[in-house]
Image (cartoon, rainbow, N blue to C red):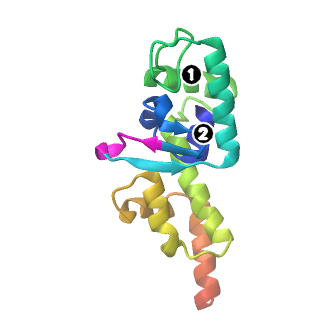
Amino acid sequence: MFGLLVVTGMRLGEVVCLTRDDVDTVAGVITIRHAKFDRVRLVPLHPTTTAALQSYAAERDRLCPHPRTASFFINTTGTPVQRNTVEKTLRTITTAVGIRTATVHPRAHDLRHRFAVETLIHWHTEGLDVGEHMAVLSTYLGHVSPADTYWYLSAIPELLALTAQRLETRYGARP
């Protein structure tokens, strides 16, 4: 589940609500039926993500052949994984590996943020026109408007530095 959050930028609430029918491992697409503002969107998957989901589904079905839910992600009793359980697990993991401290409190939503920022950094380093691609990222993330996605451009110092570097290359250094 954490891997899916990392590689798709999905919201935690979207992931825990997935049903078996929402995850098409043949086509490599997830259907989010109740995204923010109750919208529907498709999330295409990389083949490695599809393979990981197929592996999970096979193991899930082997361990729990008769679950009590249509949820894609289930717990050991065959019932849906709950959001608060995922958040508690993330707290346990981040504490165990030393990422969580008295002042740093990683959240599942931070994985979505990192996905968006890494995508923008990749586009910058590849020399792509971020403005031309912003609507794609906005749609992928399920934002209502690209303006909601532009916030990520100012969120990370590394991204600001890349943006400044591209502006300097294009318009020249200021004396």
- Residue type at mark 1: give it: Thr
User: If the image is split into quadrants, where does the C terminus sit?
Assistant: bottom right
* 141 w.r.t. 105: above or below: below
Residue 110 lies, in percent from the top left, at 52, 42
Residue 83 lies, in percent from the top left, at 44, 25
User: Going 65% across and 27% down the picture, which residue do you hit?
Assistant: 56
The residue at which mark 2 appears reads as 25
Res 89 label: 1
- Residue type at mark 2: give it: Thr
Residue 89 lies, in percent from the top left, at 56, 22
Q: CA distance from mark 2 to mark 1?
A: 26 Å
Q: Residue furthest top?
A: 77
User: Going 50% across and 58% down the picture, which residue do you hit?
Assistant: 155
Residue 66 lies, in percent from the top left, at 53, 11
Magenta highlight range: 31-38
User: If the image is split into quadrants, where does the N terminus sit?
Assistant: top right
Label 1 Cα neighbours within 10 Å, binned few <14 / some 14-19 / many ≥20:
few
Label 2 Cα neighbours within 10 Å, binned few <14 / some 14-19 / many ≥20:
some
> Considering the numbered disc 1 on the image, is that residue within a helix, a strand or a loop?
helix
Please tell me whether mark 2 or mark 1 is closer to you in this view. Answer: 2
* 24 w.r.t. 163: above or below: above
Q: Is residue 98 visible from the viewing direction of this image?
A: no
